[in-house]
């Protein structure tokens, strides 16, 4: 795995009231919040490197509608720019598991998943937190994506 991971700036959603106190919308934070949240980390590794371009474009398109997604707290997209084995995905934060599942079931999301299903491998994990901490969440996701932490079985 490449040591280089690039992240988009934090994109708050309509449920951003759960976002960390002091969040400036660009990833800055002075701590946590009392609000519970659900974190989802996804990773897509295409079989062919050029497929990564299409997946990235689709991810950016979904990011543009983020502010309209019920229960969405915030989002980072990420990419590993390794030219021979690129990977990409998201770290999304939701108010509830139900909000996450509603997004997963959206037509636009399902269309993307179906169109790339056989073009690479996908893995994802979720966890719940009693008090969402932006910095701790991104670090936990980085540990998974860099291989410093094992993905849950």
Image (cartoon, rainbow, N blue to C red):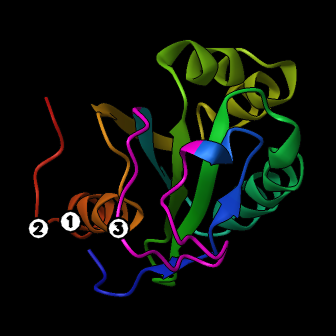
| Residue 93, percent from left and from top | 52, 43
Left/right of residue 152 with respect to residue 124 in the rendered view:
left
| Residue 145, percent from left and from top | 30, 62
Tag 1 residue: 143
* 28 inside magenta stretch: yes
Left/right of residue 108 with respect to residue 17 in the rendered view:
right
Residue at left 68%, top 68%? 50
Tag 2 residue: 148
| Secondary structure character of the magenta stretch overall | loop
Residue 52 vertical position relative to residue 115 in the rendered view, above or below: below
Residue 121 vertical position relative to residue 135 in the rendered view, above or below: above
Tag 3 residue: 31
SS class, disc 2: loop
- Kindly check if marks 2 and 1 are in contact, taking CB atoms under 8 A apart as contact: yes
Residue at left 35%, top 67%? 31
Question: Within 10 Å of the Cα at label 3, are there few (<14), some (14-19), or many (20+) other Cα atoms?
Answer: some
Real-space CA distance between mark 2 and mark 1, rounded to the nearest whole angstrom: 5 Å
Between disc 2 and disc 3, the foreground one is: 3
Earlier sequence position, callout 1 versus callout 3: 3
| Residue 7, percent from left and from top | 54, 76
Part of the protein shown in magenta: 18-36
**Disc number for residue 135:** none
User: Can I make out residue 122 in this image?
Assistant: no
Residue situated in front as seen by the camera: 39 or 82: 39
């Amino acid at each position: 795995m490449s040591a280089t991971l690039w992240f988009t700036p934090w994109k708050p959603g309509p449920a951003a009231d759960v976002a960390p106190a002091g969040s400036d919308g660009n990833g800055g934070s002075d701590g946590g919040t009392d609000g519970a949240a659900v974190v989802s980390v996804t990773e897509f590794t295409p079989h062919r490197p050029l497929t990564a371009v299409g997946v990235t474009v689709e991810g950016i398109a979904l990011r543009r509608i983020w502010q309209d997604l019920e229960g969405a707290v915030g989002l980072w997209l990420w990419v590993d720019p390794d030219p021979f084995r690129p990977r990409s995905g998201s770290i999304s934060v939701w108010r509830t598991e139900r909000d996450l599942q509603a997004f997963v079931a959206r037509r636009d999301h399902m269309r993307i998943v179906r169109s790339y299903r056989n073009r690479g491998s996908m893995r994802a994990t979720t966890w719940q937190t009693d008090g969402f901490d932006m910095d701790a969440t991104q670090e936990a996701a980085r540990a998974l994506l860099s291989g410093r932490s094992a993905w849950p079985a």
